[in-house]
Image (spheres, helix red, strand yellow):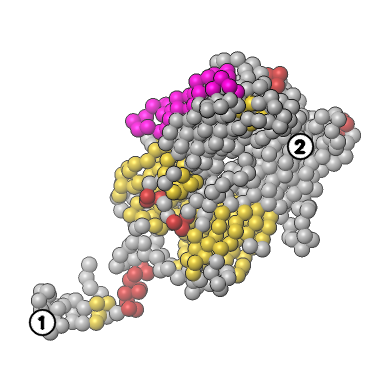
Amino acid sequence: MGYLGRRIGLSQNKGNSTPDGGGGAVGGGILDLVTQGYFQREGSIYNAPGVIYQGHNASGGVISDYAHDGWIYRAHIFNSSGVFNVTGIGNIDEEMDTLVVAGGGGGGGRYHGGGGGAGGMRAVTGLPVSTSPGSYTVTVGAGGAAYIADLGTSNQGSASVFSTVTSQGGGYGGPYLNPNTSPLYLAGTGGSGGGGNGGGSSAGADGNLGDGTNSPRATAHPGQGNPGGAGASYGGGGGGGAGAAGSDGTAPAGGNGGNGRANDYAYGPSNPVTYAGGGGGANYNDASATPTGGTGGGGAGGAGLANATATQAGNGSPGFGGGGGGNNGYNADYSNGGTGGGGVVVVRYKYGTVSSAKATGGAISYYGGKTIHSFTSSGTFATAPNWSAADVEYVVVAGGGGGGWGGAQEGAGGGGAGGYRTGTTPIGAHPVSTTIQVGAGGNGGFNLGSAASAPTGLASNGTPSYFGTPITSAGGGAGAAGQGPAPVSVAKNGGSGGGGSYIDTVGGDGNTPATPVSQGNAGGNYGNTYGGGGGGGAGGVGGNGGTPVSNVGGSGGLGVQLPATFRNPESAPSDTSNPQPYQRGGGLGTPGPSGGYYVAGGGGGGSYSASTPVAGTGGVGGAGGGGKGAANNNSSPGELAGEGLSNTGGGGGGNGGMVSGGGGGSGIVLIAYPT
């Protein structure tokens, strides 16, 4: 290109252009600072990355940069607890905005359960950033555990917190408890209230309306959600959502979950996201329609007339704070409601100015001379008019498989990790539009009750992820259940295979269906000592159960570390310990043997022990988001199996002794190209 603008030194046309020109007469000069700055902002001198760094220097969460009103905003998206670390104050604005969504409530179980209420949702502008840079603890609330068999009630979601902003967890849906348990049908309060159980109209019990008053809370807190719907005969009420109340049940139909509310902090006004939808209530005696979850991640309510036609309650969506769906009761006398979805915290601020992006889709960030698109949910990668044909680097991780249900006195297998693929592929001249699918995690197995011989309550495989259909990763294989005749309760094949159990002792195969490149590894075997096998991981096979001692679940297979291109230290993994078993949030991986950014770890196997308290040990989840296996017997609640972390493709943990397995974590798709 020509040399433009004012210069210091002789012009290109007058000076001696040879390097040995004397007397300072070498031509060309240099641009003055004003002109240099202008062309640098316009991206006309170079385009790597074309950003003027004037905002705060901060790290944590998944980074998303987007343009609005002449500014670039930077958002830090936390799907799991971590730290927002500010190391330098910018010169644009000393304020930040935050969205805080808590975990959704668990759905009511056994019969005509109420839908779980959505996690409380608060959006606050103008929070001050400390003039002394420092760290802010970010707490992302876990979704509430669903009602499980007769071991206890459903659970409220956990609160999410950033700085001075707190949102309360969603209220649990009204469960149908044992006749000797009081109160029978009470729904829980929370950020949004849970829906009432449908048994109240026939039993005459009070408390069928979740009240959504965000209690317990300080009276100065603003509203965060809405009430749940009332139950009716055989129809559970829908859980409340951030944008609307849950619908009442109408005999015998369950009510729909209340809709959530939109917010644009994560991806900008052109890409708003709806969060915090309530779970649908259950139909106990009507298979004509499935009560829907509210927009914003609410789980669908269960519906059905008999085991052959019944549908299981849906889980709330992780990262959205959706409430879990209520269970209808026909899948089994002691069936579970849906698990509440984990919450999210988003922190954004003005970051600078930038030249136009070359493509759209997902969360966009810049690192190492590359533009990175992070898809944590399905979408479209589309080139912009200034796109130049290039090879793009990708990572595609599918959803992890669910962990098996323990059954009677047996350990179940852990779920296999979602398939992992990485490489490069050409993207030609504009326009090019490519569909991105981010696979969901498989459901954990649940108590089969009187339907033990049917496949209704078995764990399921994760769903595939793809970057255009030629580049597909297979969902992780489900862990085998500890009860139910073969071939019903087998360990499933997948991207990585599920772990074996007493019924099916051999773990499932990995890299199935076969592709030109390996995606994962096989699950571990049952140890014949009440220990289920661990699910396979992308970096290693699942461990065998019962080794080196009895009553021990096999460890989940090791995951793999993301390529260096995607290890942006400003987006480092957040939740390093995953302390809550139902925490389904995630970031860009978890810690592993060589540092952070590990994905696609297998779920740990479950174990059984007749001792009280339980003496067994569940298998450890594989680094890369695998859920921990749980140890249980048939006479005490024992443990809950760990969920695979969202956006890692981790497998869910297996269980033992009549308790559900953990769900698999959703996948992720990453794309990078030269800025």
Q: Given the image, on which type of amino acid does mark 2 rest?
A: Thr
Q: Residue at x 85, y 29 (%)?
A: 179
Q: Main secondary structure of the magenta part?
A: loop
Quadrant location, the N terminus: bottom left
Secondary structure under the numbered disc 2 in the rendered image: loop
User: Is residue 333 magenta-colored?
Assistant: no
Quadrant location, the C terminus: bottom left
Q: Given the image, on which type of amino acid does mark 1 rest?
A: Gly
Which residue extends farthest bottom? 23
Q: Which residue is mark 2?
A: 153
Callout 2 environment at 10 Å: few (<14), some (14 to 19), or many (20+)?
many
Q: Disc number at residue 22?
A: 1
Q: Residue at x 62, y 18 (%)?
A: 484
The residues tagged by marks 2 and 1 sit, at their Cα atoms, a distance apart of: 87 Å
Position of residue 169 in the picture relative to residue 617 (left or right): right
Residue 366, x across and y down, in percent: 40, 58
Secondary structure under the numbered disc 1 in the rendered image: loop
Q: Residue at x 46, y 44 (%)?
A: 592
Residue 469, x across and y down, in percent: 40, 35
- Residue numbers of the magenta segment: 502-530
> Which one is in front, 193 or 530?
530
Residue 13, x across and y down, in percent: 14, 78
